[in-house]
Image (cartoon, grey):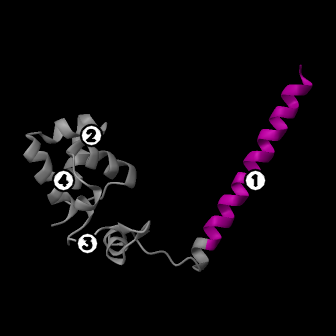
Amino acid sequence: MKIGGKVRKYREVKGWSQDDLALRLDVTQGTISNIESDKTIPNSLLLNKMAKELEVDINELLNDSTSNIMSNNEFSDHAVAAVNQYNPVFNIQSPELTESILKNQEQITKLIEAQSKLIESLLKNK
């Protein structure tokens, strides 16, 4: 069973509606609906809060088998594969990605320079 089905199961055992769980987690009902229908996977912080509220081990939410997600402070291959199914794979050597990073860095540099000039002009006017 995927994460969404498990969340639904444990929520229903508690007798909670999606709204009830959403309120406890400080998210929207739509977020809970998307998680339960496996349209999205919760980030690690939300997953941790969810496990605590539902009073289940986080391994129980993440794992389809009986093995643990973590042992000796390392993620199992099964856990990595489970999370990676929701994440796109990026080729870090992609020319497009490199170009985009360089453009962002240039924009950041320009913003810092503009900020510095603004601060200098404000200090001169005092």
**Which quadrant of the rendered structure holds the N terminus?**
bottom left
Q: Earlier in the sequence, mark 1 or mark 2?
A: 2
The numbered mark, 3 or 1, whose residue comes first in the sequence reads 3
Q: Quadrant of residue 120?
A: top right
Give the overall secondary structure of the magenta segment: helix
- Do the numbered discs 3 and 1 sit on residues whose CB atoms are within 8 Å? no
> What's the distance in space between the residues labelled 3 and 2, CA to CA?
32 Å
Find residue 69 and report its horizontal and vertical position in percent: 32, 67
Q: What whole-number distance in Å separates the C-alpha atoms at marks 1 and 2?
A: 37 Å
Magenta region, residue range: 98-126
On whether residue 38 falls in the magenta region, the answer is: no
Q: Which residue is mark 2?
A: 28
Front-most of 49 and 37? 49
Q: Which residue is mark 1?
A: 109
Measured in 3D between alpha carbons, the distance from the residue under mark 1 to the one under mark 4, in whole angstroms, is 44 Å
- In this rendering, the answer to whether 119 lies above or below 59 is above
Q: Is residue 42 above or below residue 122?
A: below
Circle 4 or circle 3, nearest the eye: 3
Residue 103 position, x and y percent, is 67, 63
